[in-house]
Amino acid sequence: MNNIQEIAEHKPTPGFFSAVGAIIWKDLSAELRSRELLSAMLVFALLVVLIFNFALELDAGTRRVATPGILWATFAFAGTLGLNRSMAVEKDRGCLDGLLLAPVDRSAIYFGKTISNLAFMLIVEAVVLPIYSVLYNTNLFNPGLIVVILLGSVGYVAVGTLLSSMAVQTRTRDVLLPILLFPVVIPILIAAVKASSGFLQGLALTDVMPYINLLIVYDVIFIAAAYMVFDFVVEE
Amino acid sequence: MITVKKLVKRFGLKTVLRGLDFEVQEGEFVALLGPNGAGKTTFLRILATLSRPSFGEVRVAGHRLPAEAAAVRSNLGVVSHLPLLYGDLTAEENLQFYGRMYGVFELRKRIDEILELVGLTSRRRDLVRTFSRGMQQRLAIGRAILPNPEVLLFDEPHTGLDQDACDMLDGLLREVAGKGRTVVMTSHDLARVEDLASRFDVLSRGIISASSKRNEMGKNNLLDFYRKALAAAV
């Protein structure tokens, strides 16, 4: 038996969580250096907030009503930009094949990319919220609103990562992702806007809970669906 | 080590591989030759578990595809004309990442060995995007052999390299192939593969139209063999 055979017969199998951790580490390290994705998302999000601020010139009452819509439109558009870029980086240098060649359950790739994308989206949201508060003179530091943003972002990124891995294989990936993504995330955007609005207007928790429940159910269903189909989506 | 029987691959109405039969013994270095569009890359992608066969039987390192794809992947190293490396990570970080994805034991020591082998120890902390194409391709080979695979698949690894880089790559290919590994390499460059491979197969119109071992073929006869194989396939 030669050396290669001996080693091959004692091949270690990488753990699922180790692979997920490796992908997150890789994405964060690369982004820390290039700052390509975060800077694009941040600039875009801040521009949207600024444009709405100057275009609408809202009074205090209307501001409270419009805030959830403006916030979620900003997060959704900036998120799409990030999702597109995050998968394009994998595709352009053939790295997606590199990931698919690893002897791990392919859902580990999905979860790794999803968690990285979620981290980028949460960073953008953490920057946008205080700036929005100052520009619109609205207090957004509400624990309920933070929970809604977290749940909404999880659902948005869970679906977005799956669809971006599908769209990235096509020539029209930049155009295709929003066309695929927005119809699918309409329920999550409506529930997130309604729940955010409820918290900002000081409604009772019982009035907001149906939307929170919808967000939780949506998150669970789409994460489970993505876990099941990711393998087929990334294969030719 | 690799057994393929009656392999068919279809993309919609287009049939790329039409009942291809192929067998590679352990330790063989097979050069897969053929014109553009013959199906070489499609065939290699099936062996690499990146694409599913439409029909037929494929076994790599004793495991059936696509059912045992994960077991095949742990015994496989792939190098294509794209480097499969992250430009914003250093050479060392790229190997560290892939090492974790493959669960490589004693990763630090193994990375040192690989960087030494591919001659990039002094550039280990440099970003891959600052590397020349030749250096990236050497690191790509390092990435492929990091988990010590039994089978190596090279898809036109010389593409885009200058003469010196090609020569350096050939030296490296000889070194990694000469350790009992089984190698399948696609190429257009007959002069390059003539000294590397131990067997030459010609893929034309979706089947292997001719096959010959190097010792059965006289010196400098590869071009003649290749032309005859293509003519016979028409």
Image: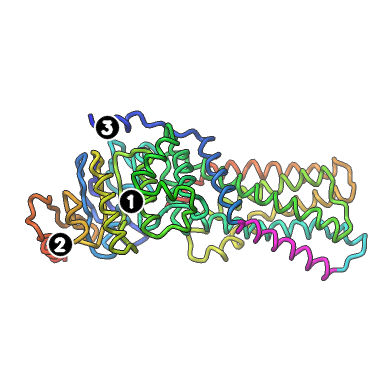
In the image, which is nearer the foreground, mark 1 or mark 2?
2
User: Real-space Cα distance between discs 1 and 2?
Assistant: 28 Å
Residue B226's tag is 2
Return the residue at label 1.
Answer: B54
What residue is shown at x 64% (from left), y 48% (from top)?
A118
Q: Give the quarter of the figure containing the N terminus of chain A.
A: top left
N-terminal of the two: label 1 or label 2? 1
User: Real-space Cα distance between discs 2 and 3?
Assistant: 35 Å
Q: Secondary structure at mark 2?
A: helix
Q: Is residue A209 visible?
A: yes
Count neighbours of disc 2 (C-alpha within 10 A) and say few if under 14, some if 14 to 19, many if 20 or more: many
Camera-side residue: B198 or A230?
Answer: B198
User: Real-space Cα distance between discs 1 and 3?
Assistant: 35 Å
Residue A23 at x, y = what percent? 53, 44
Contact check, label 1 and label 2, Cβ < 8 Å: no
Chain label for disc 2: B
Quarter assignment of residue A40: bottom right
Q: Amino acid at mark 2?
A: Tyr
Q: Amino acid at mark 3?
A: Asn
Q: Are marks 1 and 3 on the same chain?
A: no
Q: Amino acid at mark 1?
A: Ser
Q: Is residue B51 visible?
A: no
Residue A50 at x, y = what percent? 79, 65
Quarter assignment of residue A38: bottom right
Residue B110 at x, y = what percent? 40, 37
What residue is shown at x 37% (from left), y 54% (from top)?
B137
The part of the chain drawn in magenta is: A35-56
Residue A3's tag is 3
Count neighbours of disc 3 (C-alpha within 10 A) and say few if under 14, some if 14 to 19, many if 20 or more: few
What residue is shown at x 88% (from left), y 57% (from top)?
A64
Q: Secondary structure at mark 1?
A: loop
Contact check, label 1 and label 3, Cβ < 8 Å: no
